[in-house]
Amino acid sequence: MTKPLWTSSESRAAQTTLGAFSPWLSSRTGKSLNHYDKVHRFPIENPAELWSKTWDFTKISGDKGAPALPCRRPQMKPHLSQKADRQAAALRQSDPVT
């Protein structure tokens, strides 16, 4: 395999979503996922477990066991709408009183 043109520092990699997800996933599966190759291999070997854990990590609301939509995409709109509602409420609370 050829050497990559660039890699991030360990401290920068730890600040990414994947950097947060990897140790979180390791603690819940009991598997050592301390290297990108191991994290990359995990969904290939455990696809159902990955999606279940992804729902937990991202706090997507809904029924994990519900039948998928015909297009096979998760319903993100309710989750995103709830997040937008919370953000709007936070903005309203931080508005100066006039």
Image: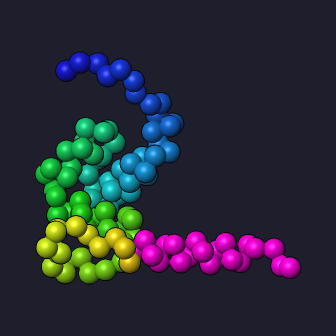
State the residue at coordinates (23%, 59%): 50
Give yes or no for residue 91 being in the magenta stretch: yes
Give x and y (percent) for residue 76: 34, 70
Which sits in the foreground, 54 or 68? 68
Judge from the rendering whether residue 2 lies leftward or rightward of residue 78; answer left or right. Answer: left
**Which colour style is shown?**
rainbow
State the residue at coordinates (50%, 45%): 15
Tell me: residue 51, above or below residue 96. above
Boundaries of the magenta span:
79-98
Outermost residue on the front side: it is 98
Tell me: residue 86, above or below residue 38. below
Give x and y (percent) for residue 39: 27, 45
- Residue 23 in view here: no
Outermost residue on the right side: it is 98
The quarter of the rendered structure image containing the C terminus is: bottom right
State the residue at coordinates (22%, 67%): 73
Which sits in the foreground, 25 or 72? 72
Q: Quadrant of residue 88?
A: bottom right
The quarter of the rendered structure image containing the N terminus is: top left
Give x and y (percent) for residue 17: 43, 51
Q: Quadrant of residue 54?
A: bottom left
State the residue at coordinates (46%, 34%): 10
Give yes or no for residue 8 being in the magenta stretch: no
Total marks shown come to 0
Q: Quadrant of residue 3?
A: top left
- Residue 16 in view here: yes
Provide the major secondary structure of the magenta segment. Answer: helix
Which sits in the foreground, 13 or 89? 89
Tell me: residue 97, above or below residue 24. below
